[in-house]
Image (cartoon, rainbow, N blue to C red):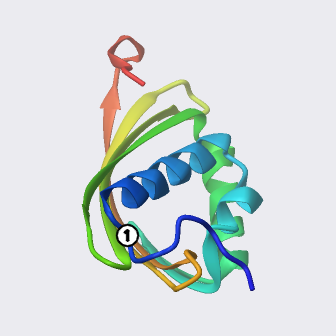
Amino acid sequence: MEQKLPLPPFNFETATQKVQLAEDAWNTQDPEKVSKAYTIDSEWRNRSSFLKGREAIVKFLTEKWANEYQYKLKKELWAFTDKRIAIRFEYEYHNIQGEWFRAYGNENWEFDENGLMMKRFASINDVPIAESERKL
């Protein structure tokens, strides 16, 4: 059986660790690696996209990072329960035209007993920024 430590039930230390592991994985921009944190049939809402399953996650992330250059993400624990974690995040990237953006958002995560994420619901807003305004 696949496991992704730390396992629920979460406490402050393990929830914080889970968030940091997610941040580290996403900053690799490796869709296959990132997808391993999710159940095979994981449900996602990312902005207005609804996804189901690892294959859809890999496809989505591959397309995302093909258009977001110099991507850098920071995640922060907001709240947690036994098997759920809420985070806030921001990331910066530029498009092919060289226009910079900072995205702000919140995510709600739910995990199975093996520490794999079953559900991820993300609300995200992009703000155009000048390259000189970058902070990540």
Q: Is residue 93 above or below residue 46?
A: above
Q: Position of residue 120 (x, y in %)?
A: 44, 73
Q: Position of residue 112 (x, y in %)?
A: 51, 85
Residue picked out by circle 1: 10
- Compare residues 11 and 60 and report the one nearer the observer: 11
Q: Is residue 48 above or below residue 134?
A: below
The residue sitting at the left extreme is 79
Residue under the image location 54 percent in, 24 percent down:
98
Disc count in the image? 1
Name the side, left or right, on which 54 lies relative to 6.
right
- Compare residues 117 and 126 and report the one nearer the observer: 117
The residue sitting at the top extreme is 132
**Disc 1 residue type (three-letter):** Phe
- Compare residues 81 and 59 and report the one nearer the observer: 81
Badge 1, how many Cα within 10 Å: few under 14, some, many 20+?
some
Residue under the image location 38 percent in, 60 percent down:
15
Name the side, left or right, on which 93 lies relative to 33.
left
Q: Could you tell me which secondary element the residue under label 1 belongs to?
A: loop
Q: Position of residue 26 (x, y in %)?
A: 58, 49
Q: Position of residue 108 (x, y in %)?
A: 33, 70
